Structure formats: structure tokens, C-alpha cells
């Protein structure tokens, strides 16, 4: 997208990665990659009117499908729109793994995030990685999951696996409600915005091979 260099308003969240993987809710047919041209296009140049552009609706695109990535996102949903900090979200997910990940025992996974925020109802601006929020690279995913979900605990949502290695299988999370706490320090631009996230996962044990690619649009509100 073209607006990257416009404004360096600082910040966005790797926390978006959590939202990234936690869709849920209403009808969310898979839509092809959106561009700013698809979303609430505003031709009026009056700034007040542009600010009032509607929040972007949740949508996703499995950008790894055409590349034969290991992970296939079969369906994702997320409501409400916008997501409200301090309230519940409802999500569902149906994700298939064609082969086990990581490919090698003891291997690790990483995720590269590109996060953009829509400004003035129209322009998508890339948010830099600041304090682990924004367009960050998250490494050591297997270690992080083992810490968050100790092997002594069962996996949530009846998932066949929730830490490495992930077996080739279908990972189906039925409609589930989840409370979204208000983070202690929320960058102001995350209080009320339309957000785009591209998440690309790599298998570090397989030469950094891309294994998943997901694009998401959603909006947040305080
Ligand atoms: C919010 O979700 C929690 C589960 O995380 C559930 O127990 C609670 O009933 C939900 N609240 C509302 C208002 O839906």
C-alpha cells in the first residue's frame, strides 16, 4: 500500500498477533486481499468527514494459499466490529496443518508482523515496532508457547496441540467468547482505529521457510 511513509505515528501491537489468531463471530466469508480502494473509500477531502469514515469490518485473507504454505486458514470469524477494549470478543477458527511444524524436532517458529493503521478514514500507515508493539518480528514462538501453556495443562478449546511440535491436523475452534482486557499502557492510536495486520510465519528449523501467511482487517474501539 502506498501510504507508508506519510506519518510516523508511533506504535502498534504484537498483541495484535493474539487477535490475529483469535477470530470469531458472524459471517466471515473469505475475502480476497483488500486494498484501501476497497474499504470505505472516501473521496471527500474534508478532514472532519474523513475522520467519520466507518470502522473497517473484520475480514481475512489466507495469503499463503497460493504459495502452498503448510498452514491453511479455512475459516475465521471475529465479532463485534469494532472490538471494544474491556469487553468480550467472539471468535471461531478452522485451520489445517498439512505437515507437522516445526519440521525438525526441537526446531522453532517465528512470525513477522506488518501492522498498518488507517488514518483520516483512508490512508494506511505502517506502524513501526515500538515496545514490542507494531510491525515486529516475534522469534522463539515455541519457547513462548511452552511458557504460556505448560505441558502439564490441557490445550484450550480441545485443540489437538497448542505447543510445538504441532501435528499435521485440523485445528477447529468453535464459536468462543473471550474477554479483552484493557492493557495498562495502550498506545492512543490503538484506542480507536481500523487496523491491518499481515502475519507471516517461518520455520526456523527449515531454513526460515514460510509456512503461513495471514492478512487481517479489524477495528478497535475504547
Ligand atoms: C464474556 O466471556 C466470558 C468467557 O470468557 C463469559 O464467561 C461471559 O459470560 C461473557 N460475557 C458476556 C457479557 O457475554
Image: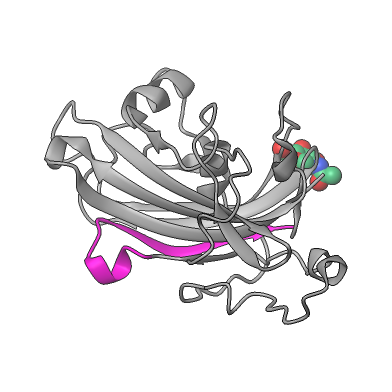
98 displayed left or right of 15: left
120 displayed left or right of 11: right
What residue is at 51 percent from the left and 42 percent from the top? 17
Question: Magenta stretch?
Answer: 63-80
Is residue 68 part of the magenta span, yes or no? yes
Question: Which residue extends farthest right?
Answer: 48
Quadrant in the picture for residue 141? top left
Quadrant in the picture for residue 59? bottom right
x, y (%) of residue 169? 30, 51
Ligand 1: image quarter: top right
Of the pair 178 and 151, the residue shown nearer to us? 178
What residue is at 82 percent from the left and 67 percent from the top? 47
What residue is at 72 percent from the left and 78 percent from the top? 42
| Residue 221 versus residue 153 in the image, above or below | below
x, y (%) of residue 33? 46, 72
x, y (%) of residue 53? 78, 69
| Residue 186 versus residue 62 in the image, above or below | above
Is residue 142 part of the magenta span, yes or no? no
Which quarter of the figure is the C terminus placed in?
top right
Amino acid at each position: 500500500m502506498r501510504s507508508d511513509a506519510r506519518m510516523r505515528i508511533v506504535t502498534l501491537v504484537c498483541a495484535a498477533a493474539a487477535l490475529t489468531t483469535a477470530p470469531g463471530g458472524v459471517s466471515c466469508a473469505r475475502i480476497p486481499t483488500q486494498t484501501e480502494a476497497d474499504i470505505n473509500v472516501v473521496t471527500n477531502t474534508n478532514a472532519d468527514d474523513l475522520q467519520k469514515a466507518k470502522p473497517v469490518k473484520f475480514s481475512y485473507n489466507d495469503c499463503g494459499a497460493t504459495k502452498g504454505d503448510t498452514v491453511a486458514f479455512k475459516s475465521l470469524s471475529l465479532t463485534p466490529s469494532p472490538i471494544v477494549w474491556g469487553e468480550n470478543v467472539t471468535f471461531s477458527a478452522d485451520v489445517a496443518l498439512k505437515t507437522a511444524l516445526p519440521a525438525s524436532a526441537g526446531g522453532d517458529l517465528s512470525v513477522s508482523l506488518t501492522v498498518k493503521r488507517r488514518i483520516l478514514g483512508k490512508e494506511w500507515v505502517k506502524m513501526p515496532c515500538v515496545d514490542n508493539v507494531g510491525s515486529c518480528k516475534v522469534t522463539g514462538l515455541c519457547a513462548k508457547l511452552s511458557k504460556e501453556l505448560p505441558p502439564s495443562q490441557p490445550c484450550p478449546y480441545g485443540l489437538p496441540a497448542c505447543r510445538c511440535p504441532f501435528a499435521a491436523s485440523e485445528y477447529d475452534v468453535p464459536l468462543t467468547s473471550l474477554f479483552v482486557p484493557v492493557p495498562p499502557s495502550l498506545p492512543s492510536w490503538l484506542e480507536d482505529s481500523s487496523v491491518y495486520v499481515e502475519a507471516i510465519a517461518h520455520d526456523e528449523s527449515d531454513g526460515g521457510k514460510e509456512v503461513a501467511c495471514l492478512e487481517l482487517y479489524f477495528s478497535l474501539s475504547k
